[in-house]
Image (cartoon, rainbow, N blue to C red):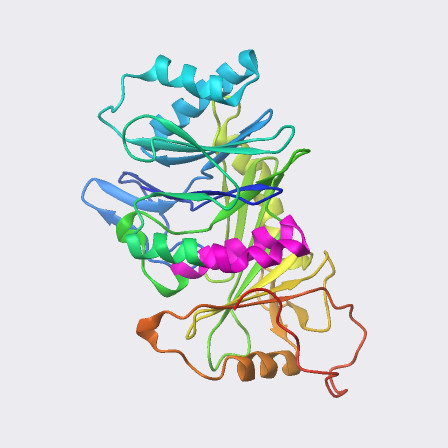
């Protein structure tokens, strides 16, 4: 069970995926990094424990459905591509080598190719028939067990966010991941095997780029200090550090037995613990808990802007940073979204704030109400 998406714009291809895996019951943490109660039921468990995107050479592949089978199919695609250097031919060979389809256990793939004259996007087994299709400009494919309502909602949200790509592929990916992450903040998706930390990447003619470094802040009404979850990708590891669980977690997925996950996790755990305290993020994503609101603030790896300050907590042995919006920014946000939509309507509201250099004292009056860019 999964939620994996691929979509294509005029200049880039994007893949995003959740991190939940349904499998044999094992010892798991009570909650995901974003506070969702994880499931252990009889012989099965649903827990945040995998990076569902793998990269090799010119290909990035999102894994969906039966995780072990999807990983094996991705390995077949990589092997075929190394020899054929053609993504379509590699997919055809994978189907012949692993068929006939449909097979007993379902697995689906989203495959992105970096190359000239433009990147390409394919989906495999999207309809359960064991075939693949290529997607064109403005098209996307949502795969997995998430409810039809959320698939439809995601497609609508991504359409609204296309304008943000003018700010760059990293800004657009940050906005898209914020929209996806908000699904789990507002709805309990683990019954469908979906949730945890979302991650993603962009593919252009020149490069495959993992998500920017993100800090998610969850706007809890009445709280001056909001829960924070930091996510980044290093050495093809998804690193997540959360003030909700006060835990760092490292997820990776290997194909063809390239690396030892336990060794890699141990190697990056110390970095994960320190990461959230550094305050060096590319974007900060504000998720409204009461209202369906996502606001993305560009940080450019600066530890503070005119909008956000970072505080190191000296209490206790585990150093954790606290994050706080400057008062005028918080007031502006709440004025902007003061009118609550009908909860049943699930009205989605989005804002993008370009980087603002630090330097103005909070006591000075605000220059103006922040402008919101992007689709609303």
Q: Position of residue 317 (x, y in %)?
A: 58, 60
Which residue reaches farthest right? 359
Q: In the image shown, does 269 or 5 lie closer to the viewer?
A: 5
Does residue 347 lie above or below 179 as drawn?
below
- The residue sitting at 60% across, 45% down in the picture is 270
Q: Position of residue 276 (x, y in %)?
A: 61, 56
The main secondary structure of the magenta stretch is helix
Is residue 30 visible in the rendered image? The answer is no
Q: Which residues are magenta?
A: 157-184
Does residue 32 lie above or below 325 as drawn?
above
Residue 206 falls left or right of residue 248: right
Residue 127: quadrant of the picture: top left
- The residue sitting at 40% across, 59% down in the picture is 183
Q: Position of residue 193 (x, y in %)?
A: 30, 47
Q: In the image shown, does 227 or 255 lie closer to the viewer?
A: 255
Task: Please identify the quadrant where the N terminus is shown.
Answer: top left
Q: How many marks?
A: 0
Does residue 143 lie above or below 291 as drawn?
above
Asked if the stretch drawn in magenta spans residue 179, the answer is: yes
Is residue 80 visible in the rendered image? The answer is yes
Does residue 186 lie above or below 59 as drawn?
below
Residue 29 falls left or right of residue 234: left
Asked if the stretch drawn in magenta spans residue 309, the answer is: no
């Amino acid at each position: 069970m999964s939620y994996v998406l691929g979509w294509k714009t005029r200049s880039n291809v994007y893949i995003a995926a959740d991190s939940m895996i349904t499998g044999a019951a094992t010892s798991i943490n009570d909650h995901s990094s974003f506070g969702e109660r994880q499931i252990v039921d009889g012989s099965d468990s649903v827990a945040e424990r995998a990076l569902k995107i793998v990269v090799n050479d010119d290909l990035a592949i999102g894994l969906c459905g039966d995780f072990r089978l999807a990983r094996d199919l991705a390995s077949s695609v990589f092997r075929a591509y190394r020899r054929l250097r053609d993504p379509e031919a590699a997919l055809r060979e994978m189907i012949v080598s692993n068929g006939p389809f449909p097979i007993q256990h379902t697995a689906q793939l989203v495959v992105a190719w970096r190359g000239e004259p433009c990147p390409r996007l394919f989906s495999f087994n999207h309809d359960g028939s064991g075939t693949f299709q290529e997607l064109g400009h403005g098209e996307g494919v949502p795969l997995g067990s998430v409810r039809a309502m959320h698939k439809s909602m995601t497609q609508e949200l991504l359409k609204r966010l296309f304008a943000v790509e003018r700010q760059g592929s990293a800004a657009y990916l940050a906005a898209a991941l914020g929209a996806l992450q908000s699904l789990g903040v507002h709805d309990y998706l683990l019954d469908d095997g979906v949730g945890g930390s979302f991650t993603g990447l962009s593919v252009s003619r020149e490069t495959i780029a993992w998500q920017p470094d993100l800090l998610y802040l969850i706007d809890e009404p009445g709280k001056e200090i909001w829960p924070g979850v930091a996510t980044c990708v290093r050495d093809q590891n998804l690193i997540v550090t959360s003030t909700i669980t006060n835990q760092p977690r490292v997820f990776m997925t290997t194909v063809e037995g390239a690396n030892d996950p336990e060794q890699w996790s141990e190697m990056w755990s110390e970095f994960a613990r320190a990461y959230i305290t550094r305050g060096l993020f590319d974007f900060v994503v504000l998720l409204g808990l009461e209202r369906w609101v996502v606001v993305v603030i560009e940080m450019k790896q600066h530890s503070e802007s005119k909008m956000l300050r970072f505080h190191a907590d000296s209490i206790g042995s585990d150093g954790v940073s606290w994050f706080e919006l400057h008062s005028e920014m918080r007031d502006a946000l709440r004025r902007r979204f003061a009118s609550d939509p009908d909860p049943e309507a699930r009205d989605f509201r989005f804002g993008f704030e370009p980087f603002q250099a630090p330097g103005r004292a909070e006591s000075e009056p605000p220059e103006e109400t922040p402008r919101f860019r992007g689709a609303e």
